Amino acid sequence: MVYLLIGALSLPLLGMIGCLEYEHLWAGFASVFSVAFVLALYWIVVVELQDPSKSPWFVERIPKEWLEEDIDQYFKLAEEAKNGKKQG
């Protein structure tokens, strides 16, 4: 889902910057390249931070206990869901 959000915002922005009239060719190239570079960096960072357990940058740094722990049980979310349904 994040891909759609970033793509929907990035591509029109890059297109509008590319359609501007630049006085010099190198100025236009530098502008489009720098904006494309920054948008690519945003894309990479967001994709890597979206699921850190699959990222090669973070997978070795995450303790194994964190990946093996049941989150619902740890935070008692399953019990709260059951109690909430019974009360509602």
Image (tube, grey):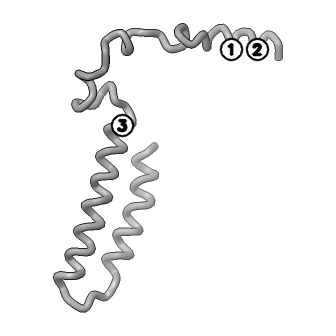
| 22 w.r.t. 36: above or below | below
User: Circles 3 and 1: CB distance less than 8 Å?
Assistant: no
| Residue type indicated by callout 2 | Lys
Q: Secondary structure at mark 1?
A: helix
Q: Residue at x 34, y 83 (%)?
A: 20
Q: CA distance from mark 2 to mark 1?
A: 6 Å
Tell me where residue 68 appears, x and y as whole percent: 38, 9
User: Circles 2 and 1: CB distance less than 8 Å?
Assistant: yes
Residue beneath label 2, please? 85
Mark 1: few/some/many CA within 10 Å (<14, 14-19, 20+)? few
| 17 w.r.t. 73: above or below | below
Q: Secondary structure at mark 3?
A: helix
Q: Residue at x 37, y 31 (%)?
A: 51
| Label drawn at residue 81 | 1
Q: Secondary structure at mark 2?
A: helix
Q: Quadrant of residue 32?
A: bottom left
| Label drawn at residue 43 | none
